[in-house]
Image (cartoon, coloured by chain):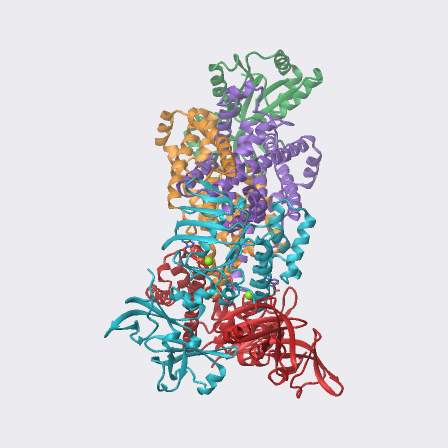
Chain colours: A purple, B cyan, C green, D orange, E red
């Protein structure tokens, strides 16, 4: 009944344009890859382990990111003035690092000859070239983005709600857990997906810091890189496979996504 | 008996909040013009903001003491509060909102449900239990906020205009219910309101704040008989005429700011700024100035006529403003004057009260 | 456990050889880490434990050696440049002179990476030879639309037809999907892979080195386009 | 006067931990690089052009991202139910693509032989290996993140505010421009910085799609990678330089950042 | 003269909104219990939500017509609105909020400033001009919202409880001012309120909504004399006793639900469900039942006593509830009975009104 508004039309057209821009390359990729090759890859043990390592490292990194990142973001969101701006700059700094540099920085900090080398080797811990390194790399690279975005989320939460929770006897922890987090849960969900997506795509820093060891630190992204070195064609098939797996996972995860009661 | 005793100082945008107040168990009404600092005061009491200096004691417990560096965080103050803008949790439904306080205090689910259901029942919103609070009507939301504030066995209740959005029926019922609840709880309660009805209902203790200061603290009756400011007079519906007591030919007279001269019981006043108050129902209205009449009169234009019950309230404007309240019959006898008509308002000197301005 | 750090161009060949190794010494673990030579060198520099280092980049090797992080290194495997074109290029390139044809989209390696370095050597060799002349080289250089940091990026762009011709290693050639144009042998610089042991490694490393020199291994390398000896 | 709360302490400690984790590698990098070398790089013409190209491409990509992204995000934020979830999945799909695959997909779509190859070459346009390709690459990779995050931002805007604007006679455009955008301006500012940071750090896809031609498509990130291949030491110095430049720029930008009047 | 005419149907959470209403220029009060659908109705009128079917005409303009697929978007309806929850723009200061409507309509800066300053002045908030709206007090915010709604020369004003957070003085002043503004503008205005004072003040046209239906539409006087529902009776302060008219021994009597029997002017009623109304000021109160008294009486316990001006309102509860209003003198003559005392309430049959229930 409602006449379509010019404005809505504009939004739709805009979305369509953007959709084209984004979907076209993906479509081209799908068209260019042969299903047979993809099917073959599906049973390749090396691909399977790489997938497993990708998932494992992402899911190890996630809790770390949440545990360290959420409270930090919340704390940052409560800071004001110059302190806040300085902290934000520090947080944004690692974002611009090209992957190679990030990988080196990690080596310099946590490698055997790095700042913590002594300490770690005395403890008998070796970080580099382990799954731990993959996780640490992900955390180092993705967390700043995650924290900065969560700060924006928390900024959007009405301070009154926390106050109401406190008055009702909630400790600040409870106010955070039962009010602030649930209020931004849809945003958090989006952040989570983006964090995982970013982790999955990581490559340069991981190859430097964690190595490219099949079965141990080789994630799908590294496997694609490796197979690109031996046979570019196969790499594209592998990339397509990654897209398809992601599509399924994303669709599944969205089914479980928190819905907004408010609407 | 654990009352609330507090002295707080805190700067606001345009003035300073300087309050000293003792609140006994039971309801104390907090009255004041918009922006007087009522909500800010409640926030200070609840611990959501800190006074620049002061002392807040609830019974034996010290909630805040700037001298000794004590500042109990809000969640330990055991306070129930209805925020002026409610602050319901948008991610929870009605049940969840009301049960929140019990949940964080560790009550079991069964008890929580029972209590929530009971409150919903009393407030006539049982059908809303599962609704999201964001889709409620204004009054429904306010009921939820009120219910929520009562679930945590508070030792001090701070209600910031908790009935502003309620319909008159609900207001009456909730007022009755609140009183019965508070009689049982017997805790100090501050109720901010702009409703004269409410002030009249909880008439025993009323504190009036203006520009961050307590200007009067007493019973509704005291406000009515000796309003200390124009605002109070207006709230309780008393004519308040500011002016000056001067001596003319050895006799004291009252000259209003508008320039009229009135006579009043001058026994207790000294020459100087003063104000004269007279109840609207002590003001008589005539078409023509009656002979041998009381000497206080004003010839004014009817500004408006409002019928309330069997009474008619009429505002006459001339150099000063006088509100007169008469019975419908009296009004009819006057020929039902309409706004714009010119009438005489007359009152007896001994029925008026006069007082020197307090600083 | 033996960990071998090898330049990524050796990925396929070394994987096969490792299978040979494990067939011979069952139960022994070999860890293969493939990345760019400089990445590997940086890792070794930062103390990541490695036993063998096979580098496609002499600079990287020298740097490690100077720091005493690897023992004496030696040339171990050779490769040569190859001019490849996309398979459907019309008209096809038949000789190096055609590379100067105007309008051709040519990709070579970035001068910082070995393949680009060698390509430049090739071009300057050609320029110095009156049979080809500097004009050809100028034309070729003006045809270059991109300098890639990785050989395989050149291959990939030829595969999808984004460029017409590129200079890559022999070992990168994919028969059937690309077309090769041989280069004058005397101007074609030799690309060398260096092998070095990291100090204080177990004798497993020697076993592996020995295998690398075995005929089976040489066969494997040859199959992937490498030449085990400098055939000069 | 106020006793420090345990909760605030926890937040601070958490932030400190995270700060350590993030700042240590950066610190290690700074310690490892020699100031002399950095100073030398500052006047290297190749570095200067790379910096210029980085800035130019980021600033060309930004308006595109905003123009296409903001309305799309707003449109998406207004969608509900299944439509919305599907669109979100599509938007999240490109995020997982490893850089190589993304670059390849772009080639397949906009390259000579790509889906649009015909069209573009008939128009006499070549996209690949130009600055345009750098920009397109950035837009393709960063926009999905940007749009998805802006959706979260717009979700947080109270619908009532737009309604009030409409009632006051604002067209939907005006409501969007004068109410919605200003209300989220602090969040937008953060998104902007993150988008630029991400663009600057981009590498794999750009190298694939746009090539690595000094003076034409070589951004700082690519230059770092290239110089890494010949002289790692110099690459790290370059990385450090990039960090320092970013620090200055970020600090400057934060000075101009919108402040929140609400506090 | 361009009035508003509308018929709208729209489902709500618990019932359907089915309204047919004509609003003439001038103020029409919209009254109704919480959750009756008042705010929802205003949203339908403003175009923020669409009725499932209906027709809305403002003068000659058709704002909505489901039959012809017309739906004017909100920004073209030329409506001024105060939202119940205000919806001030948090990113703008007070000036910016008030000037917003003029800005988007392209008024110049000078004109905008002049008009804004004028409004701020009238509303007594000139000192807040540069303040962020998020730090204002509740009443201050409401004044800003009111000012904002009047800047765009609307042709229809929808005010959703615009004075709920105002103090009594401000309420009075703004009420006067609103009336004078609206007399000049002469546009249809719907004013939602829960204030009886306000209803009495704007008494000419009152529409009452209950559960999505108009249950009465008339003047305040009509509501007072013939309240059609219990809610209306309670709002205007009239005793409303539901029950049944039956015939006993050939004579009609009224049996209340509580079980008491009353006599009333039965001329116009038929046997069946009915309700009896009696003004509180027509109810007399005695310690002992006087002889030869009117036959309608109730012996009840005093529930509460509220003093308003020179009147005392007393609620007596027995099988039914009766509110009596007497003068202070009368109350004193009774010996100032306190809650809990047992008294007789008596009223004359001919002063009560009885009516059959309308369906
Ligand atoms: N966060 C704040 N910062 C600065 N000033 C404030 C803040 N909140 C309120 N004020 C100012 O302090 C004064 C008192 O505000 P407060 O909210 O306490 O008033 P109130 O008595 O509750 O008024 P109302 O009856 O309108 O609710 C007002 O002038 C208000 O503008
Ligand atoms: N968005 C919504 N979705 C579904 N139901 C709603 C929504 N908003 C309101 N309602 C319901 O519709 C009914 C009418 O709500 P409305 O806000 O119109 O009441 P109201 O008359 O304004 O009440 P109040 O005096 O409390 O403001 C209520 O029962 C309410 O719960
Ligand atoms: Mg307040
Ligand atoms: Mg409402």
Q: Position of residue E216 (x, y in %)?
A: 59, 77
- Residue A133, quarter of picture: top right
Q: Is residue D116 visible?
A: no
- Residue E348, quarter of picture: bottom right
Relative to A99, residue B39 above or below = below
Looking at the picture, tell me which residue is in the foreground, A38 or E3. E3
Q: Position of residue D108 (x, y in %)?
A: 57, 43
Q: Position of residue A25 (x, y in %)?
A: 57, 45
Check the image and name the residue furthest to the left.
Answer: B249
Relative to B345, residue B184 above or below = above
| Left or right: D245 in relation to A99 | left
| Left or right: C207 in relation to B226 | right
| Left or right: B241 in relation to A40 | left
Relative to C76, residue B108 above or below = below
Q: Quadrant of the C terminus of chain E?
A: bottom right
Looking at the picture, tell me which residue is in the foreground, C175 or D66. D66
Q: Is residue C220 visible?
A: yes
Report the number of numbered marks.
Answer: 0
Looking at the picture, tell me which residue is in the foreground, C221 or C138. C221
Looking at the picture, tell me which residue is in the foreground, C142 or B244. B244
Relative to E220, residue D194 above or below = above
Instruction: Find ligand 4 in the image and state its quadrant.
Output: bottom right
Check the image and name the residue furthest to the right.
Answer: E249
Q: Position of residue B46 (x, y in %)?
A: 49, 49
């Amino acid at each position: 009944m409602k006449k379509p508004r010019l404005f809505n039309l504009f939004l739709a057209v805009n979305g369509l344009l953007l959709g084209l821009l984004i979907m076209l390359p993906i479509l081209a990729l799908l068209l260019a890859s042969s299903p047979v090759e993809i099917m073959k890859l599906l049973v390749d043990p090396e691909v399977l382990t790489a997938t497993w390592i990708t998932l494992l490292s992402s899911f190890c990194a996630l809790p770390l990111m949440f545990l360290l990142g959420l409270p930090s973001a919340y704390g940052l969101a409560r800071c004001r003035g110059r302190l806040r701006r300085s902290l934000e700059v520090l947080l944004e700094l690692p974002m611009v690092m090209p992957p190679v540099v990030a990988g080196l920085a990690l080596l310099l900090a946590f490698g055997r000859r790095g700042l913590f080398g002594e300490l770690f080797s005395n403890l008998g811990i070796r970080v580099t070239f382990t799954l731990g390194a993959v996780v640490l790399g992900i955390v180092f690279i993705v967390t700043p983005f995650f924290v900065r975005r969560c700060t924006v989320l928390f900024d959007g939460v009405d301070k009154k709600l926390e106050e109401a929770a406190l008055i009702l006897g909630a400790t600040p922890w409870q106010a955070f857990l039962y009010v602030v987090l649930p209020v931004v849960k849809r945003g958090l969900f989006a952040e989570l997906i983006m964090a995982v997506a970013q982790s999955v795509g990581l490559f340069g820093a991981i190859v430097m810091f964690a190595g490219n060891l099949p079965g141990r630190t080789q994630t799908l992204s590294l496997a694609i890189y490796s197979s690109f070195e031996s046979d570019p064609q196969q790499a594209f098939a592998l990339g397509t496979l990654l897209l398809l797996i992601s599509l399924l996972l994303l669709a599944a995860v969205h089914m479980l996504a928190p819905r907004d009661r408010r609407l | 008996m654990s009352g609330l005793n507090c002295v707080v100082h805190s700067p606001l945008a345009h003035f300073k909040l300087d309050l000293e107040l003792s609140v006994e168990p039971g309801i104390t009404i907090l009255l004041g013009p918009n922006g007087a600092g009522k909500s800010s005061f409640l926030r200070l009491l609840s611990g959501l903001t800190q006074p620049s200096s002061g002392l807040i004691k609830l019974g034996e417990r010290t909630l805040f003491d700037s001298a000794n560096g004590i500042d109990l965080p809000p969640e330990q103050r055991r306070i129930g509060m209805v925020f002026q803008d409610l602050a319901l949790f948008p991610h929870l439904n009605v049940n969840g909102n009301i049960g929140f306080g019990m949940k964080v205090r560790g009550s079991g689910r069964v008890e929580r449900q029972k209590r929530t259901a009971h409150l919903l029942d009393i407030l006539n919103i049982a059908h809303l239990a599962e609704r999201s609070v964001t889709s409620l009507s204004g009054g429904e939301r306010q009921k939820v906020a009120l219910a929520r504030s009562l679930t945590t066995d508070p030792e001090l209740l701070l209600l910031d205009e908790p009935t502003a959005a309620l319909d008159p029926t609900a207001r009456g019922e909730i007022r009755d219910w609140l009183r019965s609840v508070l009689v049982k709880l017997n805790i100090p309660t501050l109720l901010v309101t702009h409703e004269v009805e409410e002030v009249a209902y909880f008439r025993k203790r009323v504190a009036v704040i203006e520009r961050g200061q307590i200007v009067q603290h007493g019973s509704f009756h005291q406000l009515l008989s000796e309003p200390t400011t124009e605002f109070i007079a207006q709230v309780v519906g008393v004519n308040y005429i500011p002016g000056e007591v001067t001596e003319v030919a050895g006799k004291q007279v009252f000259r209003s700011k508008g320039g009229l001269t009135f006579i009043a019981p001058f026994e207790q006043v000294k020459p100087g700024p003063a104000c004269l108050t007279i109840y609207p129902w002590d003001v008589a209205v005539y078409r023509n100035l009656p002979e041998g009449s009381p000497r206080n009169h004003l010839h004014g234009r009817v500004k408006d006529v409002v019928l309330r019950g069997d009474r008619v309230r009429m505002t006459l404007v001339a150099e000063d403003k006088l509100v007169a309240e008469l019975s419908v019959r009296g009004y009819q006898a006057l020929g039902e004057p309409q706004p714009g008509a010119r009438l005489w308002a007359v009152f007896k000197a001994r029925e008026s009260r006069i007082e020197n301005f307090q600083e | 456990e033996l960990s071998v750090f090898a330049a990524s161009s050796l990925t396929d060949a070394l994987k096969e050889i490792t299978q040979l190794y494990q067939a011979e010494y069952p139960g022994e673990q070999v860890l293969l880490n493939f990345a760019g030579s400089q990445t590997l060198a940086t890792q070794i520099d930062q103390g990541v434990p490695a036993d063998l280092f096979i580098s496609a980049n002499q600079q990287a090797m020298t740097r490690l050696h100077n720091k005493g992080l690897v023992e004496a290194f030696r040339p171990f495997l050779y490769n040569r440049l190859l001019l490849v074109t996309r398979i459907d290029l019309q008209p096809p390139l038949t000789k190096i002179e055609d590379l100067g044809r105007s309008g051709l989209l040519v990709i070579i390696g970035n001068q910082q990476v070995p393949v680009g370095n060698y390509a430049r050597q090739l071009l300057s060799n050609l320029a110095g030879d009156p049979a080809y002349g500097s004009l050809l080289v100028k034309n070729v250089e003006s045809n270059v639309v991109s300098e890639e940091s990785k050989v395989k990026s050149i291959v990939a762009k030829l595969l999808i037809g984004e460029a017409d011709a590129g200079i890559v290693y022999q070992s990168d050639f994919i028969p059937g999907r690309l077309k090769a144009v041989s280069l004058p042998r005397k101007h074609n610089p030799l690309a060398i892979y260096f092998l070095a042991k990291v100090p204080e490694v177990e004798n497993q490393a020697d076993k592996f080195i020995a295998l690398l020199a075995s005929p089976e291994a040489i066969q494997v390398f040859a199959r992937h386009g490498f030449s085990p000896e400098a055939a000069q």
